[in-house]
Amino acid sequence: MYPPEMIQRMQIAELVSRMRVAYRNNESALTPGIYGVTREFIEDLLLRQGINCAICRKGLDDVNWDIDHDHETGKVRGLLCHACNIWLGKNEGQLIAAWRYLKGSEL
């Protein structure tokens, strides 16, 4: 028997392989240099995130995922499901403003 972490790493490697097949027409997402990431980087993110979206925590699959990154710096923040990535892209400014408001609140 393999240790649980090794089994999870094998599952993640298989998932990343399926991601590449699903994105064969748009392989740039997993091409080294794009967002400065490698396959190993994606596998490590999946392991750290438990194969879940970093926001809603729903499981990621081979077609429902995006590499979230800061559009100004290009720095990768994590992996998101497509729905959360779209939501974040539309609401990032309001989310930051709300956070600043809450931090300054006396509540």
Image: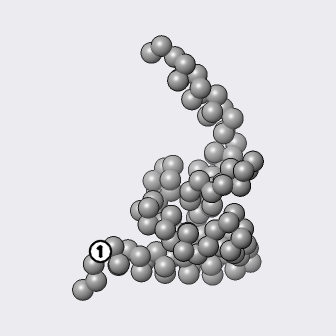
Q: Nearer the viewer, residue 67 or 103?
A: 103
Q: Quadrant of residue 47?
A: bottom left
Q: Is residue 80 above or below residue 107?
A: below
Q: Quadrant where the C terminus lies?
A: top left
- Structural crowding at the residue carrying mark 1, measured as other residues with C-alpha within 10 Å and reported as few (<14), some (14–19) or many (≥20): few
Q: Quadrant where the N terminus lies?
A: bottom left
Decide if residue 55 is on the left or right side of residue 74.
left
Decide if residue 59 is on the left or right side of residue 100.
left
Secondary element at image label 1: helix
Amino acid type at mark 1: Pro
Q: Is residue 66 visible?
A: yes
Q: Which residue is mark 1?
A: 4
Residue at position x 45%, y 53% in the image: 57
- The image position of residue 105, as x and y in percent, is 52, 16
Q: Is residue 59 visible?
A: no
How many numbered marks have been drawn onto this rendered protein structure? 1
Residue at position x 59%, y 53% in the image: 77
Q: Is residue 62 above or below residue 101?
A: below
The residue lying furthest to the bottom in this view is 1
- The image position of residue 11, as x and y in percent, is 42, 77
